[in-house]
Image: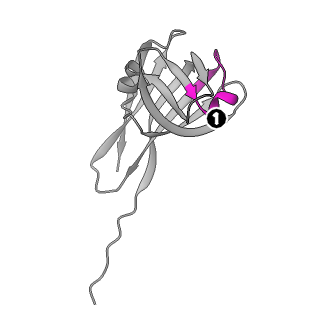
Amino acid sequence: MKEKKYIMQQTFVTSKLQKLTVTDANADYRGSITLGRNLIEAAGLKEFQYVHVNNWKTAQHWETYVLAGEDGVVTLNGPPARIFTKGDIIFVLGFTDLDPSSESAQHNAVFVNEQNEVIDVISYDINF
C-alpha cells in the first residue's frame, strides 16, 4: 500500500494595517470592507482576500473580504456598518495559508496618518 503524504498548512498574518480611520459606513450594501488601493498595495493584500477588522476603541471584531476603492478610503459595508462608524480607528489583518515547502513569505505592517496615507511599511520575513 502506498503511503500518503499530507502537507500541513499553517495560517499566518501576512498583512497588518494599523490605525486606519473609517471614512464611511454603508449599511445598504451586502458586505465587505472597501480599502484604498494605496492601502491594499502597501499591505500586499488582494481584492476579495479574507481579512479581520478590529475596532481600536470598542474591541469589536468582524471578518469579511476586501474591495478596492480610491486612495485613503476605508468603508465598512453591510452588517459591519452597524458596529463600525465613521471616525473609528481600526486594524485590518490579512491572512495567508502557507505550507512548510514555501521557502519564505513576508509580513507587512502598514502605518498611516489620519488621512489614511501610508507613512511607513515594515516588512518581516516569515521563514520555515
- Tell me what residue is drawn at x 57 percent, y 29 percent: 77
Q: Residue at x 48, y 19 (%)?
A: 111
Q: Nearer the viewer, residue 14 or 117?
A: 117
10, 76: nearer the viewer: 76
Where does the image place residue 122, in percent across and percent down from the top left? Answer: 40, 24
- Residue at left 45%, top 33%? 66
Is residue 84 within the magenta segment? yes
**Which corner quadrant holds the N terminus?**
bottom left
**Figure coloring:** one colour
Q: Is residue 76 above or below residue 2?
A: above
Say above or below: 115 vs 83. above
Visible in this render: residue 83?
Answer: no
Under mark 1, the amino acid is: Pro
Q: Is residue 3 above or below residue 14?
A: below
Q: Quadrant of residue 47?
A: top left
Q: Is residue 12 magenta?
A: no
Residue where numbered disc 1 is placed: 79
Name the residue furthest right.
58
Residue 45 screen position, x and y as percent: 39, 33
| Residue farthest to the bottom, as pictured | 1
Q: SS class of the residue under badge 1?
A: helix
Can residue 69 be seen here? The reply is: yes
What residue is shown at x 66% (from left), y 21% (from top)? Answer: 85
Question: What range is drawn magenta here?
Answer: 76-90
Measured as percent of width and height from the top left, residue 71 is found at 41, 15
Crowd around label 1: few <14 · some 14–19 · many ≥20 (10 Å): some
Picture mark count: 1
Determine whether 51 is above or below 39 in the image: below
